[in-house]
Amino acid sequence: MDKRTILAVVLSLAVLLIYQLFFIKPPAQKQQATTAQESKQISKDISVKAPVTTAMATMSRPAVQPAIVKKEASPKDIKVETDNYTAIFSTKGAALKSFKLKKYQQECSKCVSDIYPAIKSFITGTKQSPKEKSNEPIELVAINESSPYPLAITFPQLTSEITTDSIYDVDATNLDMKSSKEKNSLVFSRNFDGLKIEKIFTFNPDNYSIGLDVKVSNFTNSPIIEIPHLNWYEYADPKKEKDNYSNEGPVAYVSKSVKRKKVSDISTDLSLGPDVSWGGFEKKYFMAVVIPQDPSLTTINMSKDKNNMVSVEIRGAKSIIPPNQSDSLKYSLFIGPKDYTLLKKLGISLEEAIEFDSFIPGLKWLSIGLLIFIKFLYQFVGNYGIAIVILTILIKLIFWPLGTISYKSMKEMQKLQPKLMELKEKYKNDQAKIGQETMALYRAHKVNPLSGCLPMLIQIPVFIGLYNTLLYAIELRHSPFFWWIQDLSAKDPYYITPIVMGATQFIQQKMTPATGDPMMAKMMLIMPIVFTFIFLNFPAGLVIYWLINNVLSIGQQIYINKKFAD
């Protein structure tokens, strides 16, 4: 075959290919009629935006002219930056790709990683620069490469064309709102076969709240049904270290009650509602939630797929949009810290997401009260550790009279021990008689055997309340005390304070008058060891509270012993 023949064959193929591409129209797709089930749903509609007739409700969507399918454009990112956060939105799904909080870091950036240079620095008086850890801002969007982005919206009852991967047009470039007090908006829009979807995000640079308006326009000549599904997606990394003291997973406020689910506990879909005031995804100190305009008609669905992608789906009410009319759906978003004061100001019970009563239900009011008082002290001393020390001293002063009564009672009980032993020996075969005579002896000497336990019993609620405060209050996250303690909400990295606390408790126990069985006294001496091991992983702020309380109790015991000796 010569060159001319080869050239002729190539040109012929090229002509055929060009003809196929540009001159033959693709076959028109058949427009599916509205099914009987859709007609039934329309007739039972519970929220009609405008009056429509039964005939209108059963009309099929009009056929549209076939069009050449265009290739989706590449996604585009838009950055929104305020003094509080840096957000990255994507035209893919008109959704959120990244949300970083500027005022909160991933890790404690000032924590000393080696105590020996710190000790040397303390002894010699030279200044030591702490070894820096990651000071990257905290990221509240967790996704993988194949996952959809949070805040994507779909309308399963309306059309399958609106997906989480749909590419939207956007009306603006990056929004720089640093040092600004004015609100600004970002508008995404796209046409879907006779429909137009618009998503308008409105940013307030002063806080972490974002407004979201979703406008659906019906340009067909038939009414359409819409049930909006607004989704928050979160990738639960199975390799991530788990926090046993807090929940990480979907959370919602349904019928005035917080409903939460750990990621590991999601085995099947969980649907809640209606009466959903807000719902989303939470971590120990942060959360991202959607607040619907009408909670009474809102439900929520929590699920997890095989790839550990968690979906929190906010489902709105069903409604009908007549031809050539529009409907507007309004939401509020909160993506930020679980700051009690900040959440309380919003007035929608978002503060209920803070797990202040997770240890023992019913003590939430005490945890909140302690947090408010610690923050009050912080305004004057500028250090949460010092504020905890002052709080401990004040609590000790309040309970000082009870402590004095307790030590005095134990001293009197100690004096009665010989007589109690005589009673046990005299009535050793009659336990009922021993009990009667023992109580008579207590009454005669005006001694209450339970008074020795009273201070400890009263301090238990304070201890639990402070435990919850230090563990869950974001104000104490990464808050330093001094030297090696740079995070009061985390455990002492070198276990120094728990060991010292155990030693002070042992000293206190040795100074406490023995009032009962010698075997019981030996058991009580073991308690400091048990407490030391328990406190090893407690927040450093809580250990400091107990340590200072022990030191003050030892001082009180010395004072009482001297007073009784005189």
Image: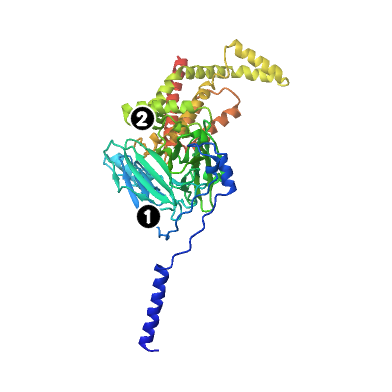
Q: Residue furthest top?
A: 444
Q: Dividing the picture into quarters, in which one does residue 146 lie?
A: bottom left
> Residue 551 — which label?
none
**Is label 1 in a helix, a strand or a loop?**
loop
Work out whether 503 lies above or below 159: above
**Relative to 430, 91 lies left or right:** left
Work out whether 169 lies above or below 513: below
Compare marks 2 and 1 and give the one earlier in the sequence: 1
Image quadrant occupied by the N terminus: bottom left
- Visible residue check, residue 268: no
Q: Residue 423: horizontal and vertical position, in percent? A: 66, 17
- 53 or 118, which lies in front? 53
Residue wearing tag 1: 75
Residue at 59% x, 19% y: name it: 417
Q: Residue 3: horizontal and vertical position, in percent? A: 36, 87
- 50 or 132, which lies in front? 50
**Is label 2 in a helix, a strand or a loop?**
helix
How far is the residue under mark 2 from the one under mark 1? 51 Å
Residue wearing tag 2: 386
Given the image, on which type of amino acid does mark 1 rest?
Pro
Mark 1 crowd level (few <14, some 14–19, many ≥20, 10 Å Cα): some
Residue at 67% x, 20% y: name it: 424
- 329 or 25, which lies in front? 25
